[in-house]
Image (cartoon, rainbow, N blue to C red):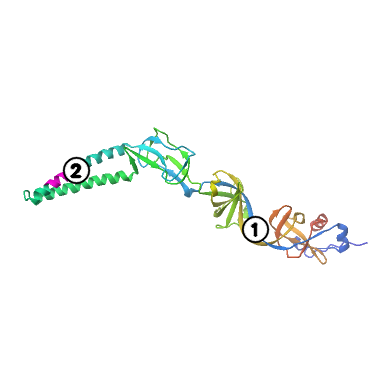
Amino acid sequence: MKVLLIFFVFPLLVFSQTLKLDQEIQQKLGIKLYTVKLEKVKEELRLPAKVSEYAGLVAEIYPPVSGVVKRVFVKEGDKVKKGTPLALVYSPQIADLQAQIRMAKVKLKTAQETLDREEMLYKEEVIPYARYYSAKIDYEKAKGEYEALLTTLRSFGEVIGDGILVRSPIDGYVIEQKIFTGSGVDISKEMFKIHSHEKLWVYAYAMPEDVTKVKKGIRGYLIWQGQRIEGKVDYVSHEVDQNTKRVPVRLLVGNVKDLLRPGLMTEVILELGTTVGTWIPIQAIQNINGRDVVFVKVPEGFSVKAVRRIKEERQMVLVDGLKDGQQVAISGLIFLRSQVEK
């Protein structure tokens, strides 16, 4: 009768153990082996995520003057182009300025007529130069006042009668409408918020142990409605969210075909780079003392080897920590594990 010998090389270091088993005992225990092969694969990290607005493409619209809304041309949810009329605001300030301009225009016309007459009389030597020069000074002053008023009026924007026409500064969607016909407004009151969906932020949430692999600038993507939407990490938080116990990671993505909307829950795949690993059946991995290990075949029996999981697909796990051609046990694992845990 064969005697089973278990020999521990370093009894205090669990992951450096060698279990001595001869071939006959291995067969009786039904231990089967799987030969591993090194492969170069892309390492990816899948994370739950939420689509959010990109602050760089959000326009908050304020009126350039105080007044009353005469007309509203759009409503919340409308898609607008850059330059689309949003609202017409009546302003007493504009009305007063328009009246001043009309008066200044009459004054300028009178000054122009006076200057023309005085210039003719001066050339005919009917009046002295001082009188002609005085008329010229009055004209230049009237012209300056008129042009200054026009410049002030133009500074408010596009004037229509006694109101200001407010237009959209960007392409996008009206996501907030805070005014209606008859609303009183001033320069501190937001009228609309417009968001372009050309680019969006996607906030992904990583476990603290995984976020160490994530660096600013790495690429990632999400799949939505059969489309691959690519982006790049532009922010990695330095804090753990106390509600989710995860670390926020933000990607800036191009919104392909306008498929995404803020608030959408999705999944992000981050591309961590290329790594060399081996695919093994999931049952080959045992968790002992909080570490993933496999039992590697050696001449005298089996060696306990720690491995790191990279990714998992259809009952197969990609790990690193093994060498090409090594054989790992995929059955009889209960017995092997029991020997380690003694």
> Is residue 114 found inside the magenta-colored segment of the image?
yes
**As drawn, which residue projects farthest toward the right?**
1
Q: Nearer the viewer, mark 1 or mark 2?
A: 2
**As drawn, which residue projects farthest toward the left?**
126
Name the residue: 57% across, 56% down. Answer: 219
> Is residue 207 found inside the magenta-colored segment of the image?
no
* Mark 1 vs mark 2, CA separation in Å: 78 Å
Snapshot quadrant of residue 296: bottom right
State the image coordinates of residue 94 (x, y, percent, origin top left).
31, 39
Name the residue: 48% across, 48% down. Answer: 55
Residue 297 in view (yes/no): yes
Q: Secondary structure at mark 2?
A: helix
Residue hosting label 1 = 43
- Position of the N terminus by quadrant: bottom right
Name the residue: 56% across, 49% down. Answer: 202
Name the residue: 14% across, 47% down. Answer: 116
Q: The residue under label 2 is which amino acid type?
A: Lys
Q: The residue under label 1 is which amino acid type?
A: Glu
Label total for image = 2
**Do the numbered discs 1 and 2 sit on residues whose CB atoms are within 8 Å?**
no
Residue hosting label 2 = 109
State the image coordinates of residue 42 (x, y, percent, origin top left).
64, 59
Of the numbered discs 1 and 2, the one sitting upstream in the chain is: 1
Q: Which mark is residue 58?
A: none
Range drawn in magenta: 107-117
**Mark 2 Cα shell of 10 Å, populated few (<14), some (14-19), many (≥20):** some
- Position of the C terminus by quadrant: bottom right
Residue 13 in view (yes/no): no
Q: Secondary structure at mark 1?
A: strand
State the image coordinates of residue 99 (x, y, percent, origin top left).
26, 38
